[in-house]
Image (cartoon, rainbow, N blue to C red):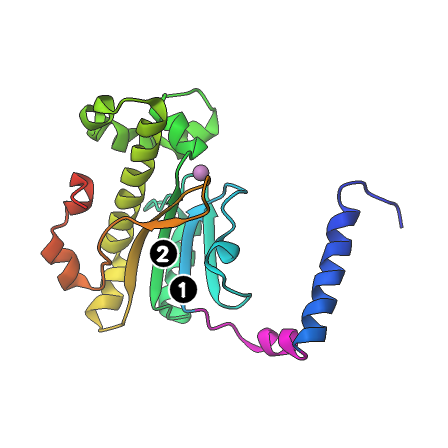
Amino acid sequence: MTKVPGIDRLLANNRSWAEETERTRPGFFAHLAQQQTPGYLWIGCADSRVPANEIVGLEPGELFVHRNVANLIQNADLNALSVLQFAVDVLKVKHIIVCGHYGCSGVRAALHDMRLGVAEHWIRPVRDICECHRHELDMLPTETARVNRLCELNVMQQVRNVCRNPIIQDAWRRGQKLAVHSWVYGLEDGLVRPLGPTVAGVKSFDELGASYLMRGAF
Ligand code: CO
């Protein structure tokens, strides 16, 4: 076979990983191939520095993952909605984690209203969050602080979007156990910071107030 620089290493890595896994845990893949029963849905940024499973120490089969630029959940995004419905209605995950990260390039681009072509349309919702919180952001002393605060505000808004989604609302109404978590990940220290209270049902969401996430009341 033709050698493909940059790719052969990946295939070799894969063979080593599969062999090592099977050696230390015989039957691992055969068992996993039967079915997946992950307890968690991860909604995170596509950034290569935020590898979902590794950050939280979960193995194949344990984390259902959806990633896009700036970890957005938009109502017209069929991809995200399909993932959400499959995770909640079929896999019956117990937890949904929305995890943003500090220094997010998508968020930074929205803050600076940068020209990005199609991606500019994608991050438009972050631009809206930025405009809603312009006063608070302008008070911050540095560009890094403004980007990082907007990363947090974006996670809060995406959690709000998840909680208001009919798929989630219906699950709560029929008594399904499902908690939604707001996290932000630090690229510089590898640590996750929970941003606020877990939302675990219609009642807790209503009690907190539908707008609490936008007020940054954490
Ligand atoms: Co990012």
114 in the magenta segment: no
Element at badge 1?
strand
Is the shortest distance between ligand 1 and the CB of mark 1 under 8 Å?
A: no
Q: Where does the image place residue 56, in percent across and percent down from the top left? A: 46, 58
Amino acid on which the number 1 mark rests in the picture:
Tyr
Return the residue at label 1.
40
Q: Which residues lie in the magenta part?
A: 26-38
Left or right of 115? Residue 216 is: left
Can see residue 167?
A: no
User: Residue shown at 42%/32% (left/top)?
Assistant: 106
In the image, residue 68 sits, relative to residue 30, either above or below, namely above
**Quick one: which residue is furthest to the front in this view?**
189
Q: Where does the image place residue 94, in percent across and percent down from the top left? A: 34, 68
Left or right of 210? Residue 158 is: right
User: Residue shown at 26%/43% (left/top)?
Assistant: 157
- The residue nearer to you, when weighing 157 against 27, is 27
- The residue nearer to you, when weighing 142 against 7, is 142
Q: Are marks 1 and 2 in contact (CB under 8 Å)?
A: yes
Can see residue 9?
A: yes
User: What is the total number of numbered labels drawn onto the structure image?
Assistant: 2
Left or right of 210? Residue 78 is: right
Element at badge 2?
strand
